[in-house]
Image (spheres, helix red, strand yellow):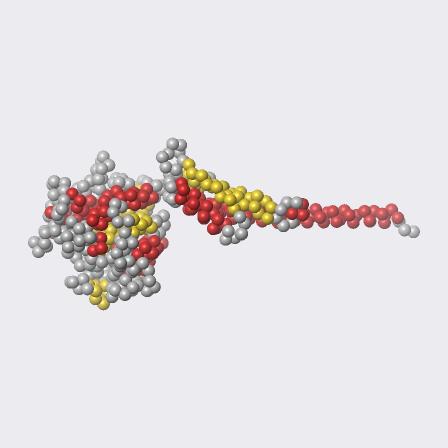
Amino acid sequence: MVDLARRGEGGQSAPLIVLMFVVLCGFVGLTIDVGYGLLQKRRLQAAVDLGLLSGARVLPDATDAATVSRAYVRDNFNRSTEQDIVVNTTTGCMQPGCEDHDRLNLVATTETPTYFVRLFGIDEWTVHARGSSCGPCDSSPVSYDVIIVLDRSNSMCTNASNVYNGCTDLINAKEGIRELLQFFDASTDRVGLAVLGSSDTNACSSTLVAANCPDPNSRPYSHTTWRADGYRRQSDQAYSPPECDGANPSIPSGEGRFYRSIGDFMDGTAANHDRWVVVPLGQGTDFKNTNGTLNENSMFLNTLDCIQGKGWTPIAPAIYESTEEMRIRGRTFDADGNDVYRAIVYFGDGGGTSTPVRRTSSGAPTTTASWYTWTTGNRDRPCQDAIQQSDRAWANYGVHVYTIGYALNEGSAQACQQNSGAVESPAINARQTLDQMAHGDGKFYEAAAGDVTSIFREIGHAITAGGTRLVD
């Protein structure tokens, strides 16, 4: 006998199973769609964070910061999806009442498509990401070790035969360096100076000068005592200051202690060669008076004032020697245990035009190896060599490299050249070289001929302001 009641109950379970299956599919679909939405939110947030850090680097310029941040968000988010995004930015102050905006706010929105839950009429999710960054921030290191590298090649002088009246470009560079000094505290910070080509190695001769020159190799070329009338800067007078003239009677008047070496100065050995760092770290700490003004009698400024134009443009050895100076004398922490920010600031008006080899007394290159060993594969590639030396400074010693290209559109010799005059292979020019040399927080700056104090001022702000970070 058939149990009709049981047969009726069996028929009623089928719709239930179908309904449960639909609900289960809905949960599975919801999980997949929500998971994809969260994935896109993480991608969008990562793009926003990168955009915030990138945009904050150009603050306080609010317009440029907004443009850079939006571009970085779009470029990075669209690498993983073709979804359209809307990016809104605002700038403001970390502390109320600031003169220059130091805070960047960013909100990004995108519509993420759904797949399963659209069965229920939901075609897309709205995904948001937001955040804020500061630049410059208030978490800067307390102390700084900075080496300024000055190109003093003949192209920096409009009239190389009259080294004091004609070197207007070199004078402009020196004025810019003086502006950069304003950003540092002589009691906690250390600023060194290097030149290319290098300087002579004659020791200090007089007792007075030796008092300002504890390292005999740090005050290249014998010279007389400093003037007492305050005339030290080239712009103050139209002749060679006597304190810059050599004590050696064979040196003509007007050719000071930084003039007589030949060109690239690649003579000597690895342990004994002409100096590129003419003011070592820790020995030019008197560059400011107690009232904060520049000390015109300081070792740093007296050395800077006496530098004259001479020779070619061997960038790589100057960067190498500056890096070695930072390796040997550079600090990781100051006396109070705070981090020390280390940087090289390079100023030049062209690319590398000489491969480091020994030279004759007339400056002609020989095939004899010098004390300097170029980086791997860059025997006849002076610009690539300079780039690799900057890579080494940043990668091995955490030295931030800032570069300034001066009047790069002027003149005809902007292509990097070998000693023979042949163009470096593969071809590279001065602008590309200096751009690729910048590392870490460093940045490539370009300046037209003339006053460069604003460029050095911008670099001073960049070094001492503390970088960028996310704050929200």
Q: Residue at x 25, y 64 (%)?
A: 421
Residue 462 drawn at (x, y percent): 34, 44
Q: Quadrant of residue 102?
A: top left
Tell me what residue is drawn at x 88 percent, y 48 percent.
4
Percent of width and height locating residue 280: 23, 49
Q: Residue at x 27, y 64 (%)?
A: 418
On the image, which quarter does residue 375 sit in?
bottom left
- Which residue is more in the foreground, 224 or 132? 132
Which residue is at the front of the view, 153 or 273? 153
Q: How many marks?
A: 0
Q: Residue furthest right?
A: 1
Q: Residue extending furthest top?
A: 97
Residue 120 lies left or right of residue 443; in this view the side is right
Q: Is residue 16 left or right of residue 169?
A: right
Residue 448 visible to the viewer: yes
Q: Residue at x 12, y 43 (%)?
A: 227
As drawn, the residue found furthest toward the left would be: 249
Residue 217 drawn at (x, y percent): 18, 52
> Residue 154: x percent and y percent?
20, 55
Front residue (pair 304, 299):
304
Asked whether residue 219 is in view, the answer is: no
